[in-house]
Amino acid sequence: MAGGGSAAGKGDAPSVRIVVAGDAKTGKSSLILTAATDTYPPNVPPVLPPTRLPDDIYPDKVPVTIIDTSSSPENRGKLVEELKKADAVVLTYACDKPATLDRLSTFWLPELRRLEVRVPVVVVGCMLDKRDEQYPVSLEQVMSPIMQQFREIETCIECSAFRHIQIPEVFYYAQKAVLHPTAPLFDQEAQTLKPRCVRALKRIFILCDLDRDGALSDAELNDFQVKCFNAPLQPSEIVGVKRVVQEKLQEGVNEQGLTLTGFLFLHALFIEKGRLETTWTVLRKFGYNNEIRLSEDQLPPPIKRHPDQANLQLQILPSPFFQSVELTNDALDFLRRIFFTFDIDGDGALRSNELDDLFSTAPENPWSDAPYKDAAEKDALGGLSVDGFLSEWKHR
């Protein structure tokens, strides 16, 4: 599967607001001006006004506004206000001043948590050109303990505005963390896809498995690719995809094609390699939002019901005036087919594992909690009969 960008933001005109914060004299303003003008500024004002990057600077073509901040006590209120409006935060330290790096874990990151600023964080070491080359520092070695403690850190990068080293990358990573966030998809500690992500991808896999044989054939893979990325896969590319999966996970491919296990493995691999835009493009193409929930336009409109007070008034009226909602015969037939499809052992009842399988493509099992958990009578072994199954839907 190939990658492809898909901007996701707030409303019809998505944009990304990045707030740059950190100790004084850590290069915040020089970083912003160099990114915006592609020129190192000889004179930098104490705090810059909001700075807009060109819309076409990054592949997603989403407007990026960068907010400079002051760390002085008298500007504390303004700093807090801006942090709470941020889509992402860039925290700076000076590569030649170790104390400013220590301040990230002793002040800045705990402060973001205290303020409940729950957005992606990119840690940026500025003034790389000023570091003493006699004392090389491994960024991974230095940042690994901090990233273990503060999982909100998306990535770390060092740069030099003076030498134009990795300046555009700083805000690319920040924008990418907003448009293609890691947290909803992947558990960094366990190094696995999160359950809601697995459920969504399983649903997508089933929708694309048109012949229902439990695998995506070459033709189905190609249709999937065209739907998500508007470009077909060449036969050699399909062979390559399946080879990558089979080398790492033999059960990921069978005679019919790419299995669900292989499909999920591919997405985990994309995420581990930093290609989150691939998985997000797939999810958004199938109607999922940033919380990996189906957006409202993908769901049937809710049934309009009278307010409780109106219902109380209606109770004294003749029966034709009562509000009543019933499943149609087509709906009942559909639900019966679903029941018998998931009654794997054919005993006429859905056990807990069969119900879990039935709802495995939903965000969660809607019948696991009150008031639906015990809404229908179960047999002695806790199984749900077809009548009980239908009554659960009527209760909803």
Image: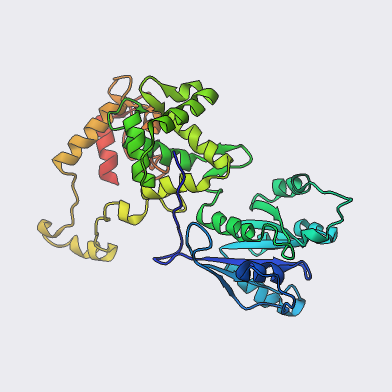
Give residue 393's quadrant in the image. Answer: top left
Quadrant where the N terminus sits is top left
In the picture, measured across the screen, residue 390 lies left or right of residue 353, that is left
Q: How is the image coloured?
A: rainbow
Q: How many marks on residues?
A: 0
Identified at 62% across, 60% down, the residue is 168
Identified at 69% across, 52% down, the residue is 156
In the picture, measured across the screen, residue 257 lies left or right of residue 86, that is left
Identified at 26% across, 39% down, the residue is 391
Camera sees residue 119: no
Camera sees residue 133: yes
Asked whether 146 or 223 is in front, the reply is: 223
Q: Is residue 148 above or below residue 354?
A: below
Q: Is residue 195 above or below residue 68?
A: above
Query: Residue 363 at x, y = what percent?
Result: 42, 44
Query: Residue 48 at x, y = what percent?
Result: 66, 77
Identified at 37% across, 35% down, the residue is 205
Query: Residue 3 at x, y = what percent?
Result: 47, 45
Give residue 92's quadrant in the image. Answer: bottom right
Asked whether 243 or 192 is in front, the reply is: 243
Query: Residue 118 at x, y = what percent?
Result: 59, 59
Asked whether 63 or 109 is in front, the reply is: 63
